[in-house]
Every structure is written in structure tokens, then in C-alpha cells.
Image (tube, rainbow, N blue to C red):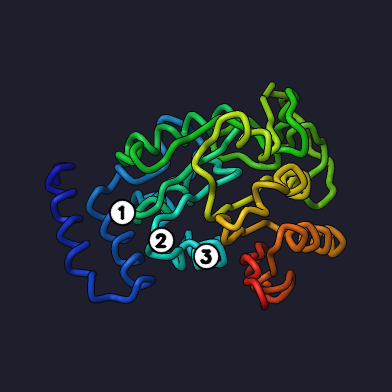
Amino acid sequence: MSRILAWIIYVIAHAITCPFGSKRRLKALYRAHSILLQRRFFISDTCRGALQFGSESGVRFSQLERSEPDTIEWLDNFPGEPVIFWDIGANVGVYSLYAALRPNVQVLAFEPGAASYRALNRNIELNGMDDRITALPVAFCANTKIDMLNMDNTEPGGSKHGFGAEVDQLNNAIDVRFRQGAVGFSIDDFVGLFSPPLPTHLKIDVDGLEPDILRGGRNTLSAPTVRSVIVEVEGSEARARRLVALMADAGFVPRSRPGDSPACRNVVFDRLREGA
């Protein structure tokens, strides 16, 4: 099947699924996109070791949903009006691509790891989403600086890296195989320097630096335009409590508490409504 024909059928699928509820419709469109475009919606096969996305040998929607059901549910419930989604710790872009299936969603995807950043951009190109996703090789931290990204591995899609840190979210030492130079910004400095589209929704998943990122983004996160944030809280109870307290300082309340569900390692925080 040609790419052009696949896109025509995909557009028809958009029309056919209009009567569906938003969550059911998005799942149906994802499956149509994966099947019809085949190897056009996946993690680039030019980067060995990368996670396949929508290919015969790769991760299908059901697998993606099983991997992080809380993240998928959060993305599925984005509102119908324009959304600016910041994907901090985008890796190779699985969740950026998924979010950008909605035409009302614009994504800024941040990934400092060289191999994953290359794969991220290749995936955006292969899926024709450069009008919806902008990838930047930026690390976020508490204070703007140049430092080392301490890497457990250098494969695209790899994890267990620490920018200026040598322990992960579980307080385990990173088995550093390579130290890659990187530029890190506090969120507030990044916004002040570059005036990017301000986020309405953020995902923060960086294997341990989540508290530092929140500290460096106090002003930005406190703005009323930021409506919802999903944060990885994996680790000790003390770490989870610290993250909840930092989000409370910015005006957010957890939708669920850490440990509420064994399947969920992330917590969604929503803007506290005035008078609530």
C-alpha cells in the first residue's frame, strides 16, 4: 500500500470515528495509523536497539498501554481545545508521537541523549509530524549549566542516565559507561531566554531529576496556563512526598496518591481551582 493511499484511508478513518467517544476514537485512529502506514509509524530501524513502534516486530498499542497505562490515560484525556504539551525526557518520542495524533496538540519534546535525540527526530520525520512536534536536545535541571549526562548505555531508547548526577530515582548508582556533555536549563531560565510556547500540559520522566526540574520551574509551573503535569514518582516514599510538596507549592493537587495503583508509577497533578 502506498503512503499516499494510506493517508487517504487514514483521513477517512478520522471521519468514520467522529461519533465515537474521545478515548475510543483516539485508540481507533492510533490502530488505523499503525496498520495503514506500517513501518512509517515506528522507532527508526536505522538505530539498532531502538524500541519499535507500530511495526510487525514492535510494540503495538496494547503493549504501549500496558507499559504505562497512567500516561496513556492522561494523554487520552487532553481537552479538545489547543494543547501545548512539553515532553521532558522524551527519549525516542513514543508519547510525543502518540499525543501529536490529535490535531489540536503541539509538542515540544526535550531529549539530551545523542542517540535517542537522533532517533526522536527520525521518527518525527518518518511520521510527517514536524508541523506538530519540535524536538530540542536540552536537559532540564535546577540551575542552568553545562554538565555531563552520565549514561548507563548509549543506545537509542536507553534509560538510567543522570544529568550532573550519578544516582537514579531509586538512589542506585548509575553504571556510567559514557559521559556525554550537555547543556541544561532551569525551566524558568529556558522560558525567559527563548520565549517558547508555554505548556498547558507537561510530562516529566527523567530517571531521578524530577525534584530538581520542579525547583527550577517554580515560576513557569505557577502560571495558570499550566493545567496538568504527570511526574514519575518511582522511588522512596520520602521522594514521592517531596514531589507532592513541590507541586503543591506551584498550585497543584495529585489526582491520585503514590502507591494507589501498583500498575502506575506516575502521578497526575491538576491545577487547584480557586476556591476549592
Name the residue beneath numbered marker 3.
74
- Name the kind of residue labelled 3 in the image: Trp
Of the pair 124 and 116, the residue shown nearer to us: 124
Is 121 above or below relative to 217? Answer: above
Q: Which mark is residue 34?
A: 1
Horizontal side of 97 relative to 40 (left or right) equals: right
Q: Residue at point 73% right, 23% down?
A: 146
Query: Which one is earlier in the sequence, the residue at label 2 or at label 3?
Result: 2
Q: Residue at point 49% right, 42% down?
A: 197
Residue 233, percent across and down? 73, 59
Of the pair 171 and 73, the residue shown nearer to us: 73
Horizontal side of 120 relative to 81 (left or right) equals: right
Cα distance, mark 2 to mark 3? 15 Å
- Indicate the secondary structure of the residue bearing disc 1: helix
Q: Residue furthest right?
A: 238
Query: Which one is earlier in the sequence, the residue at label 3 or at label 1?
Result: 1
Q: Which mark is residue 157?
A: none
- Name the kind of residue labelled 2 in the image: Phe
Residue 16, percent across and down? 17, 68
